[in-house]
Image (cartoon, helix red, strand yellow):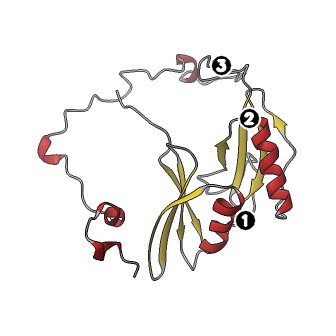
Amino acid sequence: MINYSGINHLAMVTRDMTATIRFWRDLLGLRLVAGLGRPGYRHYFFEISAHDMISFFEWPDVQPIPEKDHGVPVKGPAAFDHVAIGVNSDDDLWEIKARLEAAGFWVSEAIDHGFIHSVYSFDPNQIAIEFSAPVPSVNLRSHPRMLDKHPLPTALEGADPVTGCWPAPDEMPADQKLIYPGEGSVFASKDPKDLEAP
């Protein structure tokens, strides 16, 4: 069985890394824990929790996405709706709302979704963001519930993975368990030349 630990990182795109750092690090309080870069390219990582990060590629020629309200259907190509970031309590929601409003960002009223309370906003890249605090008396992870009035047959099979739907994989041969160097290999380097900024 695979042991998942969380979302290592969501990779977003910006054309203005300075505004992105100011928003995510300085306004929301997420630590900037890593950065890669060279002319025409940057990739920076912000820590959400001990297991989760959000990252941004800076591409100078990217165009901002059109503003789209959270959860509202669209026509045409789409692969993403919004980022929902968990916080510990409603008090965290009030602090986020106060910070965003003081900085001139639009923030929704708090919405009760039954299992979470949420506020909604947008970052400087027009990425739709939700901040969600748990309702302690409703734990869907411990007690999953399917309330779709017309659920798909596959959904009615339950919360746990169903075996036999996909071919069983063969054991990966040892000689194919290779890891190739990528952009971030410099983070593990002990050579001081690799760690120098360009």
* Residue positioned 71% across, 54% down in the render: 128
Q: Residue furthest left?
A: 175
- Badge 2 local density, few (<14 within 10 Å), some, or many (20+)? some
Report the disc number at residue 180.
none
- The answer to which of 68 and 31 lies nearer the viewer is 31
Per the image, the residue denoted by label 1 is 66
Per the image, the residue denoted by label 2 is 89
Residue 154, position as x, y percentages in the image: 53, 23
Q: Earlier in the sequence, mark 1 or mark 3?
A: 1
The residue mark sitting in front, 2 or 3, is 2
For the residue labelled by badge 1, is the local secondary structure a helix, a strand or a loop?
Answer: loop
Residue 107, position as x, y percentages in the image: 83, 53
Specify the quadrant that holds the N terminus. Answer: top left
- The answer to which of 97 and 10 lies nearer the viewer is 97
Per the image, the residue denoted by label 3 is 145
The residue mark sitting in front, 1 or 2, is 2
Q: Is residue 95 left or right of residue 80?
A: right
- The answer to which of 170 and 7 lies nearer the viewer is 7
Indicate the amino acid at tag 3: Arg
Indicate the amino acid at tag 2: Ser
* Residue positioned 73% across, 45% down in the render: 71
Residue 18, position as x, y percentages in the image: 63, 74
**Residue 88 visible in the displayed image:** yes
Q: Earlier in the sequence, mark 1 or mark 2?
A: 1
Label 1 – label 3 distance at C-alpha: 34 Å
- Badge 3 local density, few (<14 within 10 Å), some, or many (20+)? few
- Badge 1 local density, few (<14 within 10 Å), some, or many (20+)? few
Pointer 2 and pointer 3: residues touching (CB < 8 Å)? no
Residue 108, position as x, y percentages in the image: 85, 49
- The answer to which of 115 and 158 lies nearer the viewer is 115
* Residue positioned 75% across, 49% down in the render: 70
